[in-house]
Image: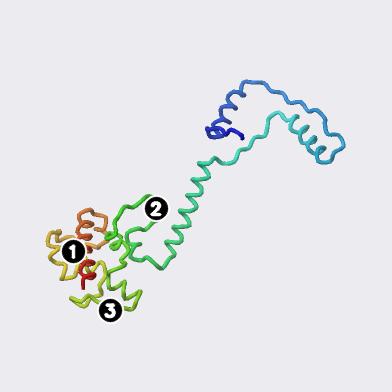
Amino acid sequence: MAIESTEEKRRIIIKIKKKLKLTKIQLQWVRAHNGTVGNERADVLAKLAASKDQIDIEFGPSKAQVRYRGKELLATKCQERWNNSEKGSWTKKFFKEVKFSRLYGDFYYNQVLTSHRVFRAHQKRLFGKEGDCPYDEQLETIEHILLKCKIWGKERDDWPKSWLQKDISDLIFYSPFKKGSIDILKKLMSSRLTS
């Protein structure tokens, strides 16, 4: 079984090149394999290589370069798909570009970011159910529940009044708003499960 180097191959090559830089090497061609067609071709190429002043060296891209390029291509393709997709219009308000950094959320907060699950607008779109809020006959979207619905007014009493005038995309990553949103969603989901 061959023992593989624990170092990256490029580092080894760099070390070898440094050691050989001051060393004088002379290549000499010796004729061999007389009469065998494949070997004759190898002989011609060996003679050509031995007669050059400089050795042709070409290395492919390193592992890091391949990984970086792959990640770059993936990001470009994902961004194109995201930009051209007709789906996710709500989520696109908050995430305009594709990123590979991890976003930590929780079950309830993900409902805010996607506008899925318990919201009647989502239920209407997917299952044809009633989409209006039972309290004020407005379409029950996440924005309606968090910023406008009368039933959740008490939960919003502690919020600064300026929040109610802002677009939800300006508030969504603000930590106190996130916490307040999660509290409302927990109560909403709990009420829907018990009714």
* SS under mark 1: helix
The first of marks 1 and 3 along the sequence is: 3
Q: Quadrant of residue 60?
A: top right
Q: Position of residue 181 (x, y in %)?
A: 22, 61
Q: Quadrant of residue 17?
A: top right
Separation of marks 1 and 2 at Cα, in angstroms: 29 Å
* SS under mark 2: loop
- The residue under the point 86% across, 34% down is 34
Q: Please give the residue where the numbered disc 3 appears in the rendered image.
A: 130
- As drawn, 128 above or below 86: below
Q: Please give the residue where the numbered disc 2 appears in the rendered image.
A: 99
Q: Residues within 10 Å of mark 2 (few under 14, many from 20)?
A: few
Separation of marks 1 and 3 at Cα, in angstroms: 26 Å
- Circle 1: residue type: Leu
- Circle 3: residue type: Glu
- The residue under the point 25% across, 62% down is 168
Q: Residues within 10 Å of mark 1 (few under 14, many from 20)?
A: some
Asked whether disc 1 touches disc 3, contact meaning CB atoms under 8 Å apart, the reply is no
Q: Please give the residue where the numbered disc 1 appears in the rendered image.
A: 164
- Circle 2: residue type: Lys
